[in-house]
Amino acid sequence: MKVEQFYDKALGHGSYAILSEGEVALVDPGRDPKPYLDFAKAHQAKITKVFETHPHADFTSCHLELHNTIGATIYINPKVGVSYPHEPMEDGDEVKVGSATVRALFTPGHSPDHNSYLLLDEQGKPHSVYTGDSLFVGDVGRPDLREGAGNIQMERSGLARMMYQTMKNVFEPMDDEVIVYPAHGAGSLCGKQMNEDTFSTIGREREQNWAFKIDDEDLFVKSLLEDQPFIPKYFPADVEMNRSGVAGFQESVDAVPRLESGSPLDTGVLIVDTRPQLAFKSGHPQGALNIQQGDKFETWLGSIVGPEERFYLLAENQQEMEDLIRKAAKIGYEKNIVGAMVPDQDQLTVKGELIDLADFSSNPENYFVLDIRNESEFKSEKFFDHAVNIPLHELREKGYQVTTEKPVVVHCAGGYRSAAGYSILSSLMPDQQVFDLSESVKEFAEESTV
């Protein structure tokens, strides 16, 4: 028996292949089936089963594609209410994978329809548990994503109480040596304080995870509900996409129109310019948003752009354009792309102005400072006493609140988010002088801690 973890750092997503006697079962696969098919081929095996812990909110899954193309059977809790062919797995149900056994464990809390899967080795001994979005390394799944999405919708307080019972009744009694394989790690917005490690053991989590240490249900609920991160715009839509199943990855990527450089862009259609911020400031189309290529492109695309919005995708070169289309497809956004292209110089008509750092440093009171970090970041530490906070994911809707005759300086914590914030505010207020503090914010952050 062999277990392989596939880790997507950009989304903080862990998926798994369980190999036994020429048979492979997957747990919570991502959108692109190729890594899993390559694994099976390398081991002269066949993917026969896909286990879904719940309908994920932060990525789309290839489970239906694997069913349609190679006949893999999908297993999921029947409470999810899926519309694709599947085998229901309820608490205690077991399925063989070669000579190993997968047992379903009902573990609600992140969602009301959540399964974890316990893997028993050839001797029937518990080997590992695939916890989905219930138990993480150092944390547990957030309980606030199903108040308006999914087959069963439930208030966060009720789900938080379910999570307490899951911890006490399902995970607490497990043996220390059982390996914990979660669906997410640090950087994912499905929890608030996940460890950088991508797997753990029950024994280690019992010692270090805060959720094992609280014996009072009311206190557990209070602790779980407070300070959860924001919910990206695309999360509810991805829950529904995963319940119905998405189109094949490669065919959907191939269907995105590739436009010739310089092709005219329809007015009224959003433009997402993914080029580096300095290139963007040197010239970009009117009203374009600068969501840069990078490790968090998928998350910020789905946080700034709504799941029903159509947009043009602009890239620095052809290779990056192809990579970005595939990244958009990981969250189901490839269908929103009206056209993808590398722009030509004639289309880059709007230029940005760089900030005079010396003047800003000497006279910060002469500027309106907009802090676009998350609310929790802003509350824990302010870099400028007179800064106003509008988090980046809310800026397109709340940017009108910036009313000032002073030049506006946008900042985040490191420069990536402020490039997007600068572009949003510039598009909303074309007559307003807007500057991006960019990476220079680090100098001011250091000064604020001295």
Image: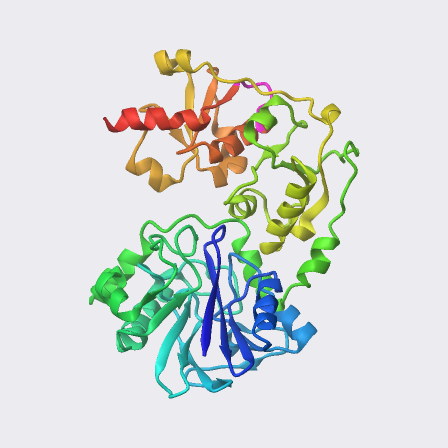
Find residue 304 and report its horizontal and vertical position in percent. 55, 42
Q: Between 4 and 259, which is closer to the camera in this rendering?
A: 4
Q: Between 52 and 384, which is closer to the camera in this rendering?
A: 52
Depicted 180 relative to depicted 406: above or below: below
Q: In what quadrant of the picture does the C terminus appear?
A: top left
Is the stretch drawn in magenta largely helix, strand or loop?
loop
Residue at 52% x, 45% y is 303
Quarter where residue 242 is shown: bottom right
Find residue 163 and report its horizontal and vertical position in percent. 34, 67
For residue 51, say whether it is visible.
no
Depicted 324 relative to depicted 144: above or below: above
Depicted 378 relative to depicted 310: above or below: above
Residue at 27% x, 56% y is 223
Residue at 54% x, 36% y is 396
Quarter where residue 372 is shown: top left
Residue at 69% x, 59% y is 250
Does the stretch in magenta take in 24? no
For residue 79, say whether it is visible.
yes
User: Which residues are the magenta region?
Assistant: 428-433
Find residue 50 and report its horizontal and vertical position in percent. 55, 74
